[in-house]
Amino acid sequence: MIGTDQHGISKLDLKRQNRMQVLRILKQNGPTSRIDIAAQLELTRAAVTIITNEMIEQGIIAEVGEYKHTTEKAPRGRKKILIDINQNYKFVVGIIIEEKIVGIGLSTLAGEVLDKRNFNINNSVGYEEIISFIETSQGEIMTYNCLQNDRILGVGLAIFPTMYSRLGISADKKGTDFSNILKDFRKFTKLPIVVDNSVKGTAMANIDFDKDIDADRHNLAFLQFGDSFNFVVTNRHDPIVSYDNRTNFVDNIIINPDAKEAFANSKRRGSVKSEITPLAIIEKAKKLYSKENTPYLYRLTNGNVSEIVLDKILEAYHSGDKLIIKIMDRCNELLAVLINNLIYTTNPQKLVLHNFKLCENQTDFLKEAVKKIGSEEIADNIMLSLVETRNRFLAGSAIAIRELFFNRGGFDRVEVE
């Protein structure tokens, strides 16, 4: 331990760093003994005992039992007592605002869902209506679960990038300005608020709330489907900064260099935006649309081309519309090209797909397509997101927990401000 001086680190900062490291080990490894923590941090057992005992007194961590040896004969001496994070130390309100849904819920520090509310939206739903739903729902959740502010770590707000303009959020190469929406949130809550990109938040949720995560897995890539494609890469469980504020760059990647025309108002022929975004798929379907060419889609839309939406295209696909099947199969082939290129260029241990609904058994289809153009090893790295549609708010929970709990070493906000 070092003292405070004008050029060095303060005792409070050092204490916070030590606690952060303890929490990080417990998050990644699960229940761990003080002896093993001391070895990993290269601290004395006495120092780790002081740090952990204080955190136990505060309810942040807890002793959870003795280490069970796998060998028949346990070694002599003092038994290892395992400690772990107290996942109910405080709770978190997570919020997500995406293109078609606003979700809010209550979770533990481990991402266990305790309560939730979802609100389906479309382009006609205004900003005030979204904020009103969140305000009302947060009050209901707090009341229903008999919680006061002191039991809540904070609020995590995760926003999908295509919603920024609708919410008065400005974004450029320098960063993202969430000040306007934060101002409106502070009108109805005194809780600490953390705001970030929902793509980043959902990636964090997939890492932090995976109960079976491999402790040796340090980097994960995350691809989310929506009106645009968004991508983030993590290294040692944290998003890489260069991908952080421009997750929608994927839309400009060329995946079909032989394309003869552009779709979806794209200026780049053969790009992701022009080939496999929902608007591009809809435009391709409209181009072939007729009673003879697309009989199922024609029937689903009552012969009205303006009623064509992605969900009806997918329904026509499953019903056997041959030309629609051809469009969708080609889209999935191009998606496989994108996935193959993203994996090769970022080299993640896993690529997680979120919100993908392009066709039935799509994961198997993609893996087979990736094998053809890449390798079986690359295909085996593809997995689906653990965050289910109804629990998307966990993206907000993950953002808040990282910033307000792990990055603060479990310190209460009053102690660090």
Image (cartoon, grey):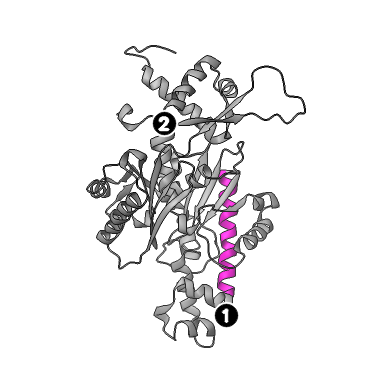
The quarter of the image holding the C terminus is top left
Q: Main secondary structure of the magenta part?
A: helix
One can see residue 325 in this view: yes
| Residue pictured at 43% horizontal, 26% vertical | 57
Relative to 310, residue 252 above or below: above
**Residue 407 in picture, x, y percent from top left:** 42, 32
Q: Residue farthest to the bottom?
A: 292
Relative to 114, residue 255 above or below: below
Q: Which mark is residue 202?
A: none
In the picture, residue 176 is in which quadrant? top left
**Residue 140 in picture, x, y percent from top left:** 32, 54
**Residue 210 in picture, x, y percent from top left:** 55, 45
Relative to 336, residue 93 above or below: above
Q: Nearer the viewer, residue 227 or 52?
A: 52
Residue type beneath disc 2? Gly
Name the secondary structure under disc 2.
Answer: loop
| Residue pictured at 44% horizontal, 23% vertical | 54
Which is more N-terminal, label 2 or label 1?
1
In the picture, residue 175 is in which quadrant? top left
The quarter of the image holding the N terminus is top left
Residues in magenta, as a range: 325-346
Magenta run includes residue 89: no
**Residue 274 in picture, x, y percent from top left:** 47, 64
In the picture, residue 331 is in which quadrant? bottom right
Label 1 sits on residue? 321
In the rendered view, does 62 fall on the left or right side of 142?
right
Name the secondary structure under disc 1.
Answer: loop
Label 2 sits on residue? 410
Magenta run includes residue 342: yes
In the rendered view, does 99 fall on the left or right side of 40?
left
